[in-house]
Image (spheres, rainbow, N blue to C red):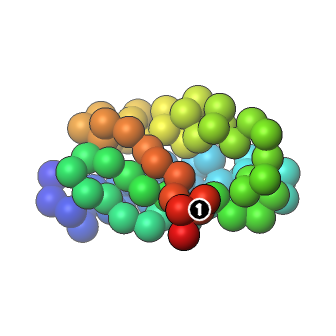
């Protein structure tokens, strides 16, 4: 799968989970995809949420892997940036 197609697939997966994040006052944006690792930035209420890592693994990563099984992991870079 070429990078443009993979990016579109990951964005589609994020669109699936985004309404749930928005309903809790947060959001998510795609930062990059490198070597089958997706980097995202949690935004709004998601940044300080105590369960954001669980949401990242069980919601975001699961949704992305369902659409793009070659993705190995999803990393939140909001705390790094």
User: Taking the image as drawn, is residue 22 in sight?
Assistant: no
* 73 to the left or right of 47: left
Name the residue rendered at 44%, 44% in the picture: 74
**Residue located at (78% from left, 53% from top):** 48
Whether residue 49 is visible: yes
Residue at figure coordinates x 58%, y 30% from the top left: 58
Residue 56 to residue 35: above or below: above
| Residue drawn 38% across the image and 39% down it | 73
Residue identifier under label 1:
78
**Left or right side of 25 for 66:** left
Q: List x then y, in percent, for residue 72.
A: 31, 36
Counting from the top left corner in percent of width and height, residue 35 is at 21, 51
Quadrant, the C terminus: bottom right
23, 33: nearer the viewer? 33
x, y percent for residue 53: 63, 38
Closest to the observer, 50 or 8: 50
Residue lying farthest left? 2
Instruction: Please count the marks in the image.
Output: 1
Seen as rendered, the residue at the extreme front is: 80
The correct choice, above or below, for 29 with respect to 73 in the image is: below
């Amino acid at each position: 799968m070429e990078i443009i197609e993979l990016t579109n697939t990951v964005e589609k997966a994020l669109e699936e989970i985004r309404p749930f994040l928005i309903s809790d006052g947060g959001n998510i944006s795609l930062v990059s995809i490198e070597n089958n690792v997706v980097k995202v930035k949690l935004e709004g209420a998601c940044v300080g949420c105590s369960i954001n890592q669980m949401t990242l693994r069980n919601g975001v990563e699961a949704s992305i892997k369902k659409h793009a099984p070659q993705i190995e992991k999803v990393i939140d870079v909001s705390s790094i940036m």
